Amino acid sequence: MTVLQENNSGKYRHEIKLLLSKAEYVTARTRISALMKPDSHSLKNGDYFIRSLYFDDINRSSYWDKIAGVTHRKKFRIRTYNFSTDVIRLECKEKNGDRIRKTSTGITLDCAKALINGDNSLLKPDSSFVTAEFLSLWGGKGLRPSVVVDYVREAYIEPIGNVRITFDKALRAGLSSVDMFDENLLTVPAYPNGMVIMEVKYDGFIPKALSMLVSSVSGEKIAVSKFTTCRDVVNNYKPQAISL
């Protein structure tokens, strides 16, 4: 399976996030799909499933830095697509103000499973920034698995401005384990009312027609983090309050 990598060039990109109701999503999707093409993976398979395992240190720095609104912060995760183990990525997502960049490297299934179990011996230092910093934080700050995050993605692209708009739906948090490869992993919805996260990423500018369209989308502009949202779900979970 070939997966489109959003940005692994080391360049920062701008990012806008909106939280949409179901009705707002339908309206936005209708307008955006008329102007933009599905990304290569969506074009072939339609919406695709993403599962990520996020890591945090013993002080929960990634979580608290996000809550505190720290301008420059990083998160590490392991990511898979469509329940396949053909492509497994160790990624660093770095945010600086309203700009982001993502760098990643491929790892094996055995290596991913070892990291989940607290063993970093299969992750060898190489020329990858991601691997080097991950291992440094693993040993220096006790970086370990924190929460599994699932969602379904619908993605569109516009080559002019390198614009990518995604709708992330059915956000769920792993409740019973941090083993992202557990076929029986229990997950629960982060938004029981079906809210959708719309993300707009671009390099230097957005074409005018598309910019006007994005500006017209009804929704709450937020600094939502799937990681912190799902971490909160796990921390606050009450079986009687959330329908599976």
Image (cartoon, rainbow, N blue to C red):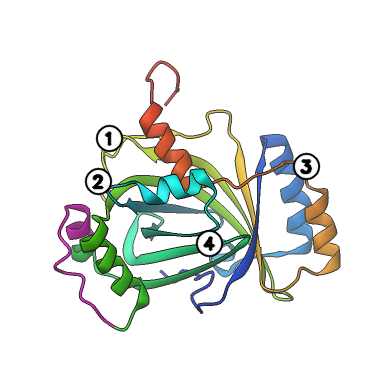
Q: Residue 41 carries which label?
A: none
Q: Distance between the residues labelled 2 and 1?
A: 10 Å
Mark 3 or 4, closer to the camera: 4
**Left or right of residue 56, residue 46 in this image:** right
* Left-right relation of 197 to 63: right
Is the magenta region chiefly helix, strand or loop? loop
The amino acid at mark 4 is: Lys
Is label 2 or label 3 in front? 3
Spatial CA span between label 2 and label 4: 30 Å
Where does the magenta region start and end?
A: 112-126
What amino acid does circle 2 point to? Asp
The kind of residue on which mark 1 rests is Ser
| Amino acid type at mark 3 | Ser
- Asked whether residue 136 appears in the rendered view, the answer is yes
Q: Mark 3 points at which residue?
A: 218
Residue at numbered disc 4: 95
State the separation of the CA atoms marked 2 and 3: 38 Å
Q: How crowded is mark 4: few (under 14 residues within 10 Å), some or many (20 or more)?
A: many
Q: How crowded is mark 2: few (under 14 residues within 10 Å), some or many (20 or more)?
A: few
Residue 172 visible (yes or no): no
Residue 26: x percent and y percent? 72, 42
Residue with the mark numbered 2: 182
Residue 82, x across and y down, in percent: 41, 55
